[in-house]
Amino acid sequence: MVHGTATAEALRERILGADAPEFWSTTRVTYLESLKASRVMFLDGYDTMLHLVGVSEDTAKVFEPLVIHFLALVYQADLAYEEAQVNGSFEVDLGWRRDMEDLLEGYGLLDQQARARLDDLQRYFELEGQLLLGQVEVTEDSVYEVLSIRSSDIALAIPLMLNLVGVDPRIVDELVRVNKPLYMLWEIADDVPSYDKDVAAGSYSTIRMYAKIFGAERGRAKLEEFRARLVEQACAEFAKVSATTLRIFVGSVAPAWLMPLVRRMPRGLLVPILQSSIRKDKMTRPELPKMIDEN
């Protein structure tokens, strides 16, 4: 454990302890949903998330049941909303949300901020469907709103894990703020390799929406401008947060051998290093595909 106050033993007891609330026995998650959630464990992004939280490889195993169940509920909602969209609707049974609330409540983490992030996650599913179904106009503002809450599942999972390991709430809040523009950049980047398939399937993607609003050529230029603004937004956030938060952020991506040096770096050096790194990073801003005018 690196960042939090909870010991490894206390964390194991809290997450894996024998005492569990009765309402956890009513959750219904299919094997398909659990299987999709389990695949996350093999993605590089999951390791980055664990480094951000600050747990060792052994302790990370303690989180697996919680993370798998949480993401299985996300996939449950995702599949339900996709099916609803096929039938011309954006409304589904909210059992997935009730089960998420029960999960958080069981750990004593269903506070006002958690409820707000759940609101964002539900709003994301519903608004994306409304845009695809033509029930909400596709505009820069509506596309921005979807993008700003599209990573609400991760924006909920990371604070949940940070709170469990006992990280100072002020640091948790700073990490949430720093990561928000980066989540938006990563979501756009995630749409790049699937763009042609998204167009063929009529699926939602930020790239498609910009082409719908502005046309193919201008849409590409406008999206590039938007990505550049998000980079500067992230850089501005780096300049506002504490040295502790900056070191935690660096630790999520830097190799272990570099961390003793990072821990000795003053805030005045960490800020420009992170700002320069984000501005040069091509993984968060891969080249956009040639966009198709769908109007």
Image (tube, rainbow, N blue to C red):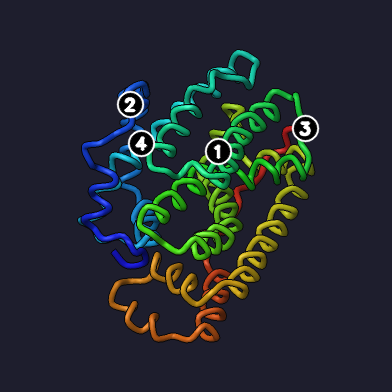
Label 1: how many Cα within 10 Å (few below 14, some 14–19, many 20+): many
Residue 78 image position (x, y, % from top left):
50, 29
Asked whether 86 or 244 is in front, the reply is 244
Label 3: how many Cα within 10 Å (few below 14, some 14–19, many 20+): few
Foreground: disc 2 or disc 3 = 2
* Residue of label 4: 37
Height in image: 191 above or below 180? Answer: above
* SS label for mark 3: loop
Q: How many marks?
A: 4
Foreground: disc 1 or disc 3 = 1
* Label 2, label 3: how far apart the Cα atoms are: 53 Å
Disc on the earlier residue, 2 or 1: 2
- Residue 22's label in the rendered image is 2
Residue 39 image position (x, y, % from top left):
32, 39
Residue for point 44% across, 74% down: 247
- Residue 295's label in the rendered image is 3
Disc on the earlier residue, 1 or 3: 1
Height in image: 188 above or below 23? Answer: below
Q: Is residue 147 left or right of residue 168?
A: right
Q: For the residue marked with disc 1, what is the amino acid? A: Leu
* SS label for mark 1: helix
* Residue of label 1: 118
Disc on the earlier residue, 4 or 1: 4
